[in-house]
């Protein structure tokens, strides 16, 4: 048995006997907040008002210092759609999501990049 195999075996035995001794890293919600804080591009956060998940998310944000800081990120634009449910299931809500998303993309599309296609928004008659 070579030294590398012996060291691997010893590490596996140590792990089996003592478990993972490494300090745990940030949990998923904290990693999301840290990712947002480190992200330099604009972010659109749409929250539906009649949605338990959105409500629980915001409760978590208000109780977590990292998320409190993340929600103040200058590149974050948050829109609360008061009458919307979790899936924006009514056509008017879905249309609003589409318009907000399109406007967000158009507002943050660099016009100076060659080959960038920016469609004209549909005209209402």
Image (spheres, grey):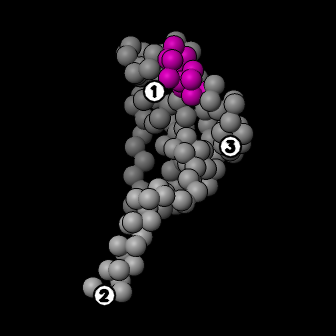
Secondary structure beneath dot 1 equals helix
Q: Which residue is mark 3?
A: 66
Instruction: Determine the CA span between mark 1 and mark 3.
Output: 27 Å
Q: Secondary structure beneath disc 2?
A: loop
Ranked by sequence position, the earlier of labels 2 and 1 is: 2
Numbered disc total:
3
Cβ atoms at labels 1 and 3 below 8 Å apart: no
Give me the residue at 42% from left, 40% from top.
Answer: 120
**2 or 1: mark nearer the eye:** 2
For the C terminus, the image quarter is top left
Residue 11 to residue 21: above or below = below
Label 3 packing within 10 angstroms: few (<14), some (14-19), many (20+): some
| Disc number for residue 60 | none
Q: Residues within 10 Å of mark 2 (few under 14, many from 20)?
A: few
Q: Residue at the left extreme?
A: 1
Place of residue 16 in the rendered image (x, y in percent of width and height, measured from the top left): 40, 59
Q: Position of residue 2 (x, y in %)?
A: 30, 87
Q: How many angstroms separate mark 2 from mark 1 (CA)?
A: 61 Å
Question: Which contiguous range is marked in magenta?
Answer: 47-58
**Residue closer to the observer: 25 or 59:** 25
Residue located beneath label 2 in the image: 2
């Amino acid at each position: 048995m070579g030294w590398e195999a012996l060291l691997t075996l010893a590490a596996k035995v140590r792990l089996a006997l003592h478990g993972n001794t490494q300090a745990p890293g940030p949990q998923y919600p904290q990693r999301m907040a840290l990712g947002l804080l480190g992200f330099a591009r604009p972010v659109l956060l749409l929250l539906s008002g009649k949605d338990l998940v959105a409500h629980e998310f915001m409760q978590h944000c208000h109780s977590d210092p990292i998320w409190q800081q993340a929600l103040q990120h200058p590149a974050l634009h948050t829109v609360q759609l008061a009458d919307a449910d979790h899936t924006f299931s009514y056509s008017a809500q879905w249309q609003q999501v589409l318009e907000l998303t399109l406007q967000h993309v158009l507002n943050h599309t660099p016009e100076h990049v060659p080959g960038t296609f920016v469609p004209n928004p549909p005209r209402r008659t």
